[in-house]
Amino acid sequence: MTSVFRRVIRARGDVLFTGVLLLALGCLANGLPKLYADVDVYRLGALTLLEGKSIYHDLPVSAIGGPLPYTYPPSSAVLFVPLALVPTWLGYPLLTAASAFALVPLVTAYRAAAPELRTLLDRSWLVVAAAIALLLGHPVANTIYWGQINVLLMTMVALDVLLPRTPWPRGLLLGLAAAIKLTPAGFALIFLLRKDRRALLTSIASFAAATVLAFVIAPSDSLFYWTDRVFNATSMRIGGPLANESVVASLEKLGMTGVSLSLVAALLAVAVLAGTWFGTRAALAGGDLVMALGTTAAGVLLLSPISWSHHWVLALPTAAIVLLRGYQRHHAPLLLSGWLAVVILWLAPHYSLPAVEQWDVLDDIIGSSYQLLALALLTVMSVRWFRRGTPPTVTQRDFEAVA
């Protein structure tokens, strides 16, 4: 009985230490002062919704003083209501703490799906160390800097996709994440290719439930969003060109406009769709769940009209897996690729470029470094698929066996 009590006390101490450490590092990540612009938009959206006003037309001025539009579905404002109960100065550290804590289950989900991580991260403090490493990398640090919710969303997706078993219906978290931001909906491709109909239908149902609830609470805003705002996402871009790592943004920075921009963007979109489809199939066929998640993430981010560099939360763990595999297998090209990807994702070299509307070719290569890494991953994974011929699709039973 005494030994059990001691283990409980020790476990609680570990949790407390982890929480304090992650919270402190989260608050210090990426420098001061914090802008917390996005968390203020989340909070103002929920407040406006509770007041019965339009979140798209009547949003108050944010804490940083600028008019920031609400670009998310109305269902997100419903889910952000808890933030409306606290002031911005408190909402920001609460979201920071939640994001920092979420990195631990994110790393745990990767460990559950990647055999090489099960031995490497076989102690709780090593899981915390990996979480800290992610926290200090640019995508997560920049997420915290802006008061964004990307870490929480990607943790929800990773838990739904990577865990061998979930205490909730698989797909529930992915659907709710998509109800907050539409981008996570693209990860349903994994359920589709795995022929996991239950998870796919669950994700659709949870997304639909949140959307219907928003229609009941805010019918006018819901109608406006789904008939207008959702088709004009690119017009809602706020800020300079540096952080937007979408394909369309890079083409614009090369000076493309009008028909040429639309044509090249459409051709690239088809290529990215094909690469994502075949690359994810190749990963699933080999039981490589973490790479299936990384490949899908690469495609989703490339296809999105707006992909701020803080959206690339899952890119760093994917690059770390490539690096680790190169080291464990003594594979020099894989090791070099992993190191290069980790360094680029960690340092975000595009932030060293001039903040202009158009770059020259060299600047665009540097500024598009995240996208080039994603395109390289899609290419390699697609080649894996075609080299294997036509392997059978991994089913749900196969998935649970390899996970």
Image: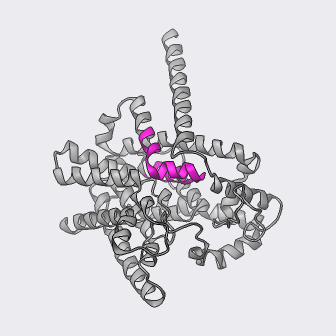
Image coordinates for residue 402, horizontal then vertical, percent: 31, 47
Q: Judge whether 278 appears above or below 155 on screen.
A: below
Report the colour scheme: one colour
Image coordinates for residue 76, horizontal then vertical, percent: 66, 60
Residue drawn at the location 47% of the way across and 63% of the way down: 188
Is residue 42 highlighted in magenta? no
Q: Which residues are magenta?
A: 132-161
Dividing the picture into quadrants, the one containing residue 99 is top right
Residue drawn at the location 36% of the way across and 61% of the way down: 295
Dividing the picture into quadrants, the one containing residue 213 is bottom right
Q: Judge whether 301 appears above or below 159 on screen.
A: below
Image coordinates for residue 131, horizontal then vertical, percent: 44, 40
Find the residue positioned furthest to the top: 2
In front here: 133 or 352?
A: 352
Image coordinates for residue 349, horizontal then vertical, percent: 39, 58
In front here: 383 or 92?
A: 92
